[in-house]
Image (cartoon, rainbow, N blue to C red):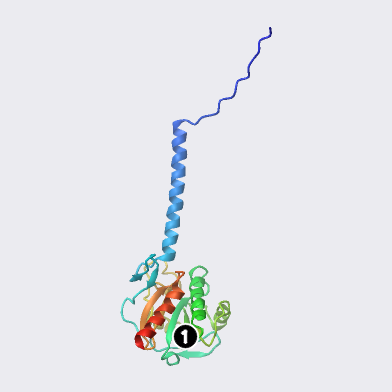
């Protein structure tokens, strides 16, 4: 009889112990880096390193001024070429944001929060929104007019202000934000720390709270604080 040859199955290739350890280590490092990146990004978006009041979920609600600040005298030009002075703002709550229009990361988010505040306070004429440029050399009246239109700014309630560089710098540094020439962001226009903040000024010209404009709930928090202050003064 002819000999029957039974075909042999090929044995699957196996990894030796060294290859196995390398693969496991690589997967572990990848997962760790991914998790670390997500944690850092979440923290930058939802945490303010100088927060004095946070909600139960850890989001910043309000930030106390670093020292008592008041709104100084000013005379600046809005997006329609009109002059706005401190006197025009007397007796109103001011919600103040800071931008430079060439900024493409944080400033649009902050301005979006201001847009929400405008909508939430549409029936409250005693609330005025103000956006101050920290880059007045580039943010001219026409530039601010185009920028403000992208967010549906009502020029009667929301003023985008520019002016002489020294005047702008003095107003912002004295009334709102401290200059910062030591951080990695010192090369940015104005050299101010925390331009992501939205400031709330009471009808007496006192800066009462800041809010982190990069937090999703910033607009609601600002409106809630104004409501609380109104109730406390009535």
Q: Which residue sits furthest left? A: 67
Q: Is residue 193 left or right of residue 102?
A: left
Residue 134 appears in view: no
Residue 13, percent from left and from top: 54, 29
Is 13 located above or below residue 69 in the figure? above
Give the residue pinned by disc 1.
Answer: 128
Task: Locate the C terminus by quadrant.
Answer: bottom left
Tag count: 1
- Of residues 43 and 176, which is closer to you in this image? 43
Q: Which residue sits furthest bottom? A: 87
Residue 36 quadrant: bottom left
Residue 155, percent from left and from top: 54, 86
Residue 91, percent from left and from top: 41, 91
Is 132 located above or below residue 37 in the figure? below
Residue at image position (41%, 82%) is: 227
Q: Is residue 25 left or right of residue 141?
A: left
Residue 38 quadrant: bottom left
Q: Which residue sits furthest top? A: 1
- Of residues 233 and 169, which is closer to you in this image? 233
Secondary structure of the residue carrying tag 1 is strand
Residue at image position (50%, 71%) is: 109
Label 1: how many Cα within 10 Å (few below 14, some 14–19, many 20+): some
Q: Is residue 93 left or right of residue 79?
A: left
Residue at image position (37%, 83%) is: 229
Task: Locate the N terminus by quadrant.
Answer: top right
Residue 224, percent from left and from top: 42, 78
- Of residues 1 and 60, which is closer to you in this image? 1
Is 211 located above or below residue 122 in the figure? above
Residue 39 appears in view: yes
Residue at image position (50%, 75%) is: 111
């Amino acid at each position: 009889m002819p000999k029957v040859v039974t075909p042999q199955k090929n044995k699957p290739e196996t990894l030796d112990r060294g290859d196995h350890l390398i693969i496991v280590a690589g997967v572990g490092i990848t997962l760790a880096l991914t998790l670390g990146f997500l944690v850092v990004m979440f923290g930058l978006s939802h945490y303010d390193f100088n927060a004095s009041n946070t909600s139960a979920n850890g989001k910043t609600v309000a930030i106390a001024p670093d020292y008592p600040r008041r709104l100084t005298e000013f005379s600046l030009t809005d997006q329609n070429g009109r002059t706005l002075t401190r006197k025009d703002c007397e007796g109103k709550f001011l919600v103040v944001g800071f931008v430079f229009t060439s900024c493409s990361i944080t400033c649009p988010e902050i301005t979006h929060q201001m847009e929400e505040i405008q909508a939430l306070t549409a029936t409250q004429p005693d609330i005025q929104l103000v956006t101050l440029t920290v880059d007045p050399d580039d943010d001219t009246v026409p530039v601010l007019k185009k920028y403000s239109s992208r967010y549906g700014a009502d020029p009667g309630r929301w003023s985008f202000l520019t002016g002489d560089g020294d005047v702008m710098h003095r107003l912002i540094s004295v009334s709102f934000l401290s200059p910062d020439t030591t951080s990695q962001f010192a090369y940015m226009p104005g050299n101010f720390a925390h331009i992501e903040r939205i400031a709330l000024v009471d009808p007496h010209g006192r800066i009462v709270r800041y809010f982190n404009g990069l937090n999703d709930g910033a607009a609601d928090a600002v409106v809630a604080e104004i409501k609380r202050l109104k109730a406390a003064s009535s």
